[in-house]
Amino acid sequence: MSLPKNTTVLIVGAGPTGLASALSLLHHGFKDFVIVDAVVKGHNSSRAISVHAATLEALDVIGCGDELASKGTKITSVDFDTRTRALARLAFDTLKSHTRYPYALIIPQTLTEHILAEKLASFGVTVHRPHKVVGMKVNSGDANLADITFEDEQVITTRYVIAADGARSAIRTIVNIGFVDPEGDTVDDSTSLAQIALADVTFDNPELSHSNFRIVMSANNPFLSAPLPFTFNEYLAKETGKPIVAERIFRIARGASVEEGPVPHAPSKAYIQDLVNKFGPVDLSSDPSVNPSGKSVCVKEVIWSSRVRIRAAVADTFFTRLSSGSSSKPEGAAILLVGDAAHIHSPAGGQGMNLGLRDAVFLGEALAKHVKATESMLQSEADDILTKFVTERRARALEVIGFTKSLNSIGGMKDGIVAWWLPVNKVTLRDWAIWILGRVYYLREQVTWAFSGLGRR
């Protein structure tokens, strides 16, 4: 596909964050942009599955909140259990006085991306694919412009670049912005959580269709089971051309330590079944002698599987200019990082895509203001708008990284006693704490507030 020669804003990356950036620009009356992506088609893996209240409210701004909510499963509570007994139920009804989305929306990232892409297409905007960025330099005729070179040797000249191209961002790499763990490369001895096995599966028991979102706590690593919406079954059938999957699809996730060895790149059905039998709730066990129903429940089909390595990193800055270095004035095309190009962290708490989507929605407003401001003031003065924006977004990223690390420490707590003077098993103590949490309204309210993102939009 032939690319335009010039644009004011180039959005690199058409995942949920890039698409939301484009929709936000349109919402704020700005249309002079081009959006590109390196792959022929959007990702067919489901990856993130949770959209929280603060993100749905942000998506409301660009007209997508209710559309997304209508396609997902509204989870009003999360159960925290051991394999054999209940610990706590975290109910989201405590959010009712704060938002019209008092739940966690379960919707696979692929479906979120599809909905955003259709919304963008309804405005007549085309995502240009496949176009991979391989170079960027200052324009020879105007130092405030950048020439972006693609693998097929096409070039776009632009004034702004929005890097929404993921954790391995080509844009961030080219402009040499650092991307490291804010706490350094030290090993967290409080947790063994290093990687996560993920899978979307069906079971051979149709009675599981309405099971709750469950997290099973154990030593070292937690196990998660969540029902995905039937709209996902319909989406998969449409995308693949295969018959619709009749059974409810569940997301299965289980953390793994370094000592357990690497999780396979695409875990097999047998591997996932073994995880369910060893670490999942006993009512999902394929062993009838263990399953309280006296019957076996087996994984019927693996729709998709993958692994995620646990890592946290944040870019040194979310805004810079591609300067030629020949002037002391702040000049050069503006480079702005959003989503995984700006920050990554553990998927604990389902915060990653949420933070990126909020970055994108709020960036549209800031960037539209900046473009307008440059018409009447010096660029250095107008840059205060972008500087303020990225300072706030980076602060939010650091908060979320800290929050997910805390969740990792709790979920991935190592087995062993607290101390010689307190010979209590750490995992047992943690489970007691969760049990108490489930019985104190104020504590439940604080935890649901933290998950919702409403306090750090």
Image: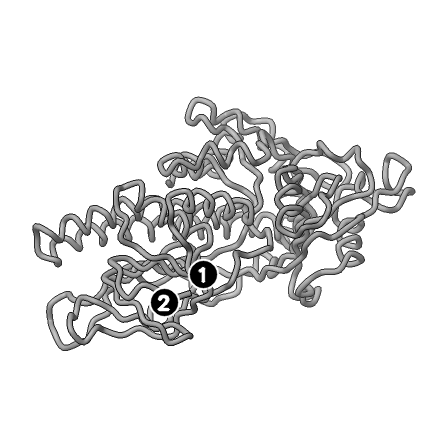
Q: In the rendered image of this protein, does residue 91 appear above or below residue 428?
A: above
Mark drawn on residue 132:
none
Residue type of the residue flagged with mark 1: Gly
Left or right, residue 144 beside residue 296: left
Out of 352 and 9, give the one closest to the viewer: 9
Q: Which mark is residue 172?
A: 2
Identified at 68% across, 48% down, the residue is 252
Mark 1 highlights which residue?
Answer: 166
Residue that appears at 70% across and 43% down: 249
Quadrant containing the C terminus in the rendered view:
top left
Residue 313 appears in the picture as rendered: no
**Which quadrant would residue 307 be assigned to in this image?**
bottom right
Residue located 83% across and 46% down the image: 298
Q: CA distance from mark 1 to mark 2?
A: 10 Å
Residue 391: x %, y % from top left: 27, 52
Q: Position of residue 33 (x, y in %)?
A: 30, 55
